[in-house]
Structure formats: C-alpha cells, structure tokens
Image (spheres, rainbow, N blue to C red):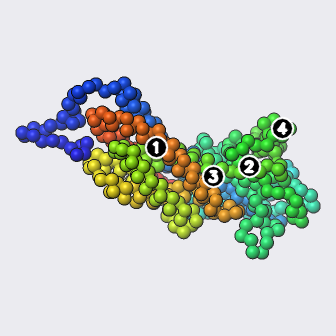
C-alpha cells in the first residue's frame, strides 16, 4: 500500500497511517533516531541548491588553441547558463544573437595571447551558436616567425565573469609538423584554468624543431616548483589585471584528471543525486538498491559513450527538462504506488539513458571531441569518476535509509516526506528549465 493510501472504515476516514500511527511496542532506539536525523539532513543538503536552474551551476568550459603554420586559433566554448551575470538576459531580447555580437566586439575582454610577453593582435573573430545553449567563439591570430623557442601564453580573461568555481580546460595543439595522415597534432599543453589561475603558458619550439616534448598540467599532481613564489608567473600586460599562470616547462608529465572531473560532476550534479536519492528511498534491502544502481549505471554509461562519440545528440533544451521530469516521476511513483522491483529497474534504465545524455553534455561543454589523442580514454576515466562519486553517495545514504527502516513508522514517514520534498524540487527545476528556453533561447 502506498504512503498516500487512506483506509476507509465504517464511513469514516482512517488517517491512522499518516496522522495517528499506532504506538510501537517499543520506543525507537537511539541509533534509529540518529539514523533518521542524518538521512533527513542528507536529503535537505541535496535539496539546498534549488535556486539553480541547471544541474551544475559552477560550470565547465573549453579553450582549444591550435597552431597551424603561421596561423593560431583559440576556440572557446561557453554555455549560455554561465553567462547570466556577464550578459543578463533582461538586457538582451534576442539573447544568442545579441550576446554573440557583444562577444565579437569585446574580444579584448575575452582572451589574450602573448608571445614572449608581447600581446598578439587579433586577425579575426567569429562567435556562433554551436548547439542549443552552447556558444563557440573562434579568435584568429598570426604567429610571428622565430628560429628559437618562444613562450606562448594564453590568458582566459573572461573567467572573472564566470560563476564561482567555474573551470576551463585548456588544450594547446601544435599542427605545424603534423603528418599527412594524422588526425591531430602534438599536444603541447593541457591545463585546468580557474579565476585564481587564469592563464596557461608553454615553451613553443620553432617549426623545424621536434626536441621539446608535450607539456601537461592538471589536477592530479601539484604544479612544478619554480623560482617564482607558488610556481606562478605574472606577465606585465595591464596595470589593473595580470595573467596568472604556471611558469612554462617541458618536463612536467602530469595530466588533467578526467576521473576527478567525473567525481566532481556527479557530486555537484544535484539533479542526478536527487534522482538517485528518490530511487533509494523505497529500497528495503541492499539487493534491491544494488540492482537499481546497476541499472542506472549501465543505462547512462551507454548513452554517455554514444553521445560523447557524437553518435547520438540531443540539445540540452530537451535533456535538462527531461532529467527534471524523471525526478518528479520517480518521486510521484514513490507516493502513489509500490512498484515491483522489475518495474522500478525498467524505469531506472529508461531514465538512466536520459541522464547519460546529461553527463555527455558536460564533456561537450569542454570540447572533448577536439582533444588530440581521441576521446576513448578520457571518456572511460570520466565515466569511472561518475561511478565512483555515485557509489560514494549511495554508500553514505543507503545504510542510513536501511537503518531507519527498522522502525515501520519512521520508514513510512521518511518515504512520504522525502518523496514530497524531491517532487517539489524536481517540479521547480522542470518549470524553470522550460521557462529558460524562452528567456535565453
């Protein structure tokens, strides 16, 4: 019987299950009370960021610099959801067209490339809608000829305008001596930029030299120590602001950790966590929870791989509302019926396919498809990170829920109140995501 069922007996409504439950033979133990409080607290924490319309308010973006002959192009991918502070929707009626025009005319506030601390002039700039909700800005430069190695610095000046915690993946690809049958050039630098460290620097060899090896920096290892304090160098360009970058080196072998990005994506992906919590609320045994989590994992792994490889693609304007709708559906089902395990597993698989497309959108935001070396290995590491984060959350939440289920009264209250809370938050997200399609376009 569902938690909203009302028993009718002798012409009177019996609300005893919800309003005046029978007094149990023994008072709830101290451990049960603590487990219940922790479970409710966990649900409350998951529901805190309802002010955010999208799943990942801190945002990711990509910056891919390619060097081909004497030409350089910086391709920046930005999601419109991260531009609200910089370009408030109320000021731009035709949001995409107006914002792309603003970006083209204010490229100096967007990015700056330097060779040996000298800023390069912009040859051309073009901003356009790559897909629904995702903008790309291509900025072209000319590379000065040189017979010696030079220092190339890429300053992502717009990070100060992004939401707090925003991260941008920077890739510098050298195609000057690329083989005719090669798909990508030499990856000279891969780095993670934030507002605290908003530039990346690399020693760029002359075209005839192949002695210098690719440089990699990321979140798996600490940046190399240099003579400068904290390994950071500032390059004198503006009096008010200066780029902050690690000193260039050709010996650092650390890489961007897509595994850690996967963990961070699921931990900060409040809608994915809320969906998982709604599924676990009705699990009475560990085997049930294991089956549900497995179905969710397999399903979203399939669509994540297909979407990241560009075999399947749906616009975020469809994916984001669909994810919110899946939360509302599962929460409502918790309240109205008690589905058998096979049905809940089937529903989990169906919605897991949708959530996988949501995971893939994060990889497209950072331009995974443009990364030299292919997408298979980064995709696998990202997915493993997602699974690790998901299992960590389940490992904390599930024991608390199972412990609370030792008391029938507490278990029914937890399922009802938790599902109502999840449904309300999911409905809020669904409404705001649909409305945002008309505001931002």
Give the Cα distance between marks 2 and 1. Answer: 31 Å
Task: Identify the residue under disc 2.
Answer: 254
- Identify whether 296 is placed above or below 235: below
Task: Identify the residue under disc 4.
Answer: 228
Dot 3 or dot 1, earlier in sequence: 3
Rendered residue at 39%/45% (across/down): 286
Task: Identify the residue under disc 1.
Answer: 394
Rendered residue at 24%/43% (across/down): 4
Dot 3 and dot 4 residues touching (CB under 8 Å): no
Dot 4 and dot 1 residues touching (CB under 8 Å): no
Rendered residue at 37%/49% (across/down): 288
Dot 4 or dot 1, earlier in sequence: 4
| Pair 4/1: label in front | 1
Q: Secondary structure at mark 2?
A: loop
**In the image shown, does 81 or 170 lie closer to the viewer?**
170
**Number of numbered discs visible in the structure rendering:** 4
- Identify whether 5 is placed above or below 141: above
Instruction: Specify the label residue 258 is tagged with.
Output: 3
| Pair 2/4: label in front | 2
Q: Is residue 416 left or right of residue 199?
A: left
Instruction: Specify the label residue 319 is tagged with.
Output: none
CA neighbours of label 1 inside 10 A, class few (<14), some (14 to 19), many (20+): some
Give the Cα distance between marks 3 and 1. Answer: 21 Å
């Amino acid at each position: 019987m569902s938690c909203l069922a009302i028993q009718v007996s002798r012409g009177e409504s019996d609300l005893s299950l919800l309003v005046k439950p029978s007094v149990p033979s023994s008072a709830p133990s101290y451990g049960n009370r603590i487990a219940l409080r922790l479970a409710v607290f966990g649900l409350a924490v998951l529901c805190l960021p309802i002010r955010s319309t999208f799943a990942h308010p801190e945002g990711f973006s990509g910056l891919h610099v390619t060097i081909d002959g004497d030409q350089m192009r910086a391709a920046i991918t930005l999601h419109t959801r991260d531009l609200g502070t910089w370009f408030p929707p109320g000021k731009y009626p035709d949001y995409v067209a107006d914002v792309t025009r603003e970006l083209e005319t204010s490229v100096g506030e967007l990015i700056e490339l330097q060779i040996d601390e000298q800023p390069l002039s912009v040859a051309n700039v073009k901003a356009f809608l790559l897909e629904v909700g995702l903008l790309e800005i291509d900025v072209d430069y000319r590379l000065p000829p040189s017979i010696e190695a030079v220092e190339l610095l890429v300053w992502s000046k717009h990070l100060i305008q992004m939401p707090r915690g925003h991260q941008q993946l920077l890739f510098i690809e050298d195609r000057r001596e690329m083989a005719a049958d090669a798909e990508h050039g030499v990856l000279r630098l891969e780095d993670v930029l934030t507002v605290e460290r908003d530039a990346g620097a690399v020693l760029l060899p002359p075209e005839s030299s192949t002695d210098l090896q690719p440089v990699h920096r990321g979140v798996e290892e600490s940046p190399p120590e240099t003579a400068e304090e904290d390994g950071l160098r500032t390059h004198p360009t503006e009096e008010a602001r200066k780029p902050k970058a690690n000193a260039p080196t050709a010996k650092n072998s650390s890489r961007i950790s897509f595994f850690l990005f996967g963990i961070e994506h699921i931990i900060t992906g409040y809608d994915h966590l809320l969906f998982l919590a709604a599924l676990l609320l009705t699990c009475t045994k560990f085997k049930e929870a294991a089956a549900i989590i497995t179905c969710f994992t397999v399903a979203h792994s399939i669509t994540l791989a297909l979407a990241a490889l560009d075999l399947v693609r749906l616009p975020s304007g469809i994916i984001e509302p669909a994810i919110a709708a899946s939360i509302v559906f599962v929460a409502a089902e918790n309240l109205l019926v008690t589905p058998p395990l096979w049905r809940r597993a089937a529903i989990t698989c169906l919605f897991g396919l949708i959530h996988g497309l949501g995971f893939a959108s994060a990889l497209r935001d950072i331009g995974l498809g443009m990364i030299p070396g292919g997408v298979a290995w980064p995709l696998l590491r990202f997915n493993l990170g997602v699974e690790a984060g998901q299992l960590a959350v389940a490992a904390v939440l599930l024991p608390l829920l199972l412990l609370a289920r030792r008391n029938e009264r507490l278990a029914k209250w937890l399922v009802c109140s938790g599902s109502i809370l999840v449904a309300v938050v999911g409905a809020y997200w669904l409404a705001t995501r649909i409305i945002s399609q008309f505001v931002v376009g």
